[in-house]
Amino acid sequence: MKSTHSAVTDIFQDVEPRQSSFGVAILNKERFVDALEKCNSIEDFPSLKDNITAIRKIISLPKNDSEGLLNIDSNGDTISLRKDVLISELNQILDSQTIGRAKYYLKRLEDGIKRVKTSKINDINLHRWKEYDDIITDSLWVMDKRDSSGAHLGWYWGNFIPQIPHQMMVRYTKKGDWVLDAFVGSGTTLIECRRLGRNGIGKL
Ligand SMILES: C[S@@+](CC[C@H](N)C(=O)[O-])C[C@H]1O[C@@H](n2cnc3c(N)ncnc32)[C@H](O)[C@@H]1O
């Protein structure tokens, strides 16, 4: 028998955040950090570049993984990075004009892998800000259509596009924070709260 479809049921099923549409490289964290540290200890610029080129080759063509960077240990830490961003960071190191600049970029990449850096106001990892393709830094008015995925049924004529509360919460709240929408209407904000792991309360 077909079950009764209701917005309320959908709200509780649809709790997963959106997935990035970009390719991801999953790496053995320890070995990757070791490989970067090894590069950082090299004083000869051409040989540093050779090492970075070798890492880039492994990332783009996993069959060349002689270093075991992509070998995941069952009890080891992994790091998942957006592939296009990682390749562009490696290219930036390779395009550096001086060894000092190359090491600066190298250190920045290493820091982003070793540590998470957040601020008091949100959960954005400031070391890896380039990977947040879902954060829109332009005007929200340029959005061509509303997000109608999952529980967003758009039945209420007075609703706003889900991207508005989504963007506000990603930028100005942390997971587990409480969010009050005093003008909740059809509950767009509450749906986005569920998706982003925020506690939402609203007044109709
Ligand atoms: C435009 S709707 C909000 C729509 C909501 N953002 C959504 O996406 O569904 C405004 C809501 O605020 C409520 N509202 C308007 N004036 C209010 C007031 N003075 N006090 C409390 N609620 C009010 C309305 O009942 C309505 O639910």
Image (cartoon, helix red, strand yellow):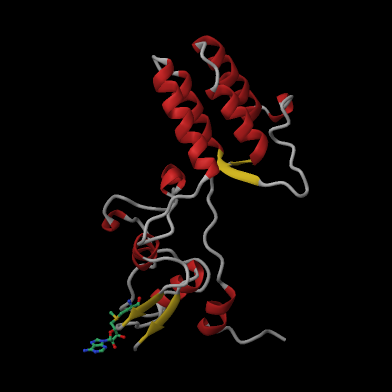
Q: Which residue corresponds to the image point at 51% horizontal and 82% vertical from the top-left?
A: 7
Q: Looking at this rendering, what residue extends furthest in the right direction?
A: 74
Residue 152: give x, y in percent of width and height. Answer: 46, 72
* In the displayed structure image, the side of residue 204 where residue 199 appears, left or right: right
* In the displayed structure image, the side of residue 97 where residue 76 appears, left or right: right
Query: Camera-side residue: 78 or 200?
Result: 78
Q: Quadrant of the C terminus?
A: bottom left
Q: Quadrant of residue 39?
A: top right
Residue 57: give x, y in percent of width and height. Answer: 63, 23
Camera sees residue 161 = yes
* In the displayed structure image, the side of residue 119 where residue 72 appears, left or right: right
Q: Which residue corresponds to the image point at 62% horizontal and 28% vertical from the top-left?
A: 35
Q: Which residue corresponds to the image point at 57% horizontal and 29% vertical from the top-left?
A: 36
Relative to 82, residue 105 above or below: above
Q: Quadrant of the N terminus?
A: bottom right
Q: Quadrant of ligand 1?
A: bottom left
Relative to 172, residue 19 above or below: above
* In the displayed structure image, the side of residue 86 where residue 61 appears, left or right: right
Residue 87: give x, y in percent of width and height. Answer: 52, 30
Query: Camera-side residue: 61 or 103?
Result: 103
Q: Which residue corresponds to the image point at 43% horizontal and 16% vertical from the top-left?
A: 99
